[in-house]
Image: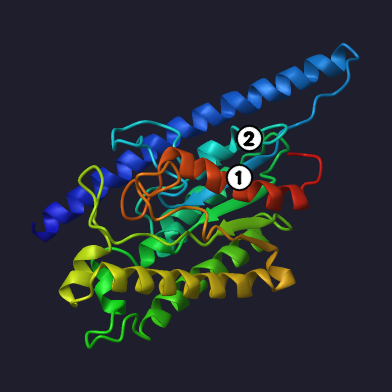
Amino acid sequence: MDNAERAKLKIQLRQQVEDEFAKRTREHRAKVHTINARQRYRKSNKLKAAKQPLDFLAIGDSWFDYPLNDYGIPWPNQDIVAKLQTIGNPSPIALSRAVHGNPMTTTMGLADQTQYVSDLADSAQWVNGSPDAILVSGGGDDVVGDQFIIYLDYFGGGLSSRIQGAVDSVEASYQALFDFRNLYAPNTPIFGHCYDYAIPNGIGVFFQGPWLQPPLNFTHYDYADGLTIVQNAIDRLYSMLNGLASVKKNNYYLVDTRGTLTRDSSQPLGWANEIHPYSAGFLALANKFLPVLQGVFSGRI
């Protein structure tokens, strides 16, 4: 593929994203309009006000945008954000700008930040005039895939110290998110997660992946080695994110999702492929978010 073909493909992919975003905007606006119309009706008829659902802006990668079912067939609403909108009292709603495959450097890149500014500027798009919180899923795609080989020790040492470079890049993206929030959505809390201990079993999905086994095989690590390496990588990411969550001014809450899923892929809470769970797993992960959200938004979810 030459440069002209790459440029054309890039434009096509961006157009697909924009078309999907427009669809999500229409659907979210319809939910907001319905909620507000019912509230106005109750007020005009002197009825007790209904509890308003929380309204989130969601950004990030495939853990917030996974349009496949357990068999790898295109199917909507299988990710954490979708499952979160089915639990809680009342269940929240969300406008998702997540795109599967997005590294944090894309999630906080120019095109995406421009989209978020447009979203935040439109008060009519939100139940309460602005999002109650920003949900973020990011960091996994900065490491997995062909580039995963960069972070492996070629001489049998497992996870290389070079992984710190990727962790630092993810941290910089989160710091950019905090600054962005402080400028365009002051005092809005941010909630994120740290993934789970994925399995390098060579299984991809829908012509994507595998993301872990090929680099491990190339550097002569077996499956057992790979499990340890992946766990160490996730723990490194958790440690960095937990550090960010400990800084009060960041107004950032980390949901510890490690250990939610089982490495037995025959179980409902197992992995559908190397880096994504089954639908039941996404629901379990959403349920990890619930108490953290309830701790901040007492009585509202």
Q: Position of residue 237 (x, y in %)?
A: 49, 71
Calculate the distance from the C-alpha at mark 2 to the C-alpha at mark 1. Answer: 8 Å
Q: Let me know if residue 118 appears in the view.
A: no
Q: Are marks 2 and 1 in contact (CB under 8 Å)?
A: yes
Furthest residue toward left: 1
Q: Which residue is drawn at 66% across and 46% down?
A: 290
Q: Report the quarter where the C terminus lies.
A: top right
Furthest residue toward top: 45
Mark 2 highlights which residue?
A: 87
- Residue 183 versus residue 280: which sits nearer the camera? 280
Q: Report the quarter where the N terminus lies.
A: bottom left
Residue 248: quarter of image: bottom right
> Could you say which disc has been placed on residue 164 in the image?
none
Instruction: Say whether disc 2 or disc 1 marks the residue closer to the N-terminus.
Output: 2
Mark 2: amino acid: Ile
The crowding category of the residue bearing disc 1, from other C-alpha atoms within 10 Å (few below 14, some 14 to 19, many at least 20), is some
- Residue 218 versus residue 185: which sits nearer the camera? 218
Q: Which residue is drawn at 44% across and 30% down?
A: 23
Q: Residue at x 50, y 28 (%)?
A: 26
Please give left or right for residue 21 compared with residue 89 in the image: left
**Measured along the vertical axis of the image, is residue 188 above or below residue 236?**
above
**Measured along the vertical axis of the image, is residue 34 above or below residue 100?**
above
Mark 1 highlights which residue?
A: 287
Mark 1: amino acid: Asn
Q: Where is residue 205 in the image (x, y as percent from the top left)?
A: 26, 45
Q: Let me know if residue 232 appears in the view.
A: yes
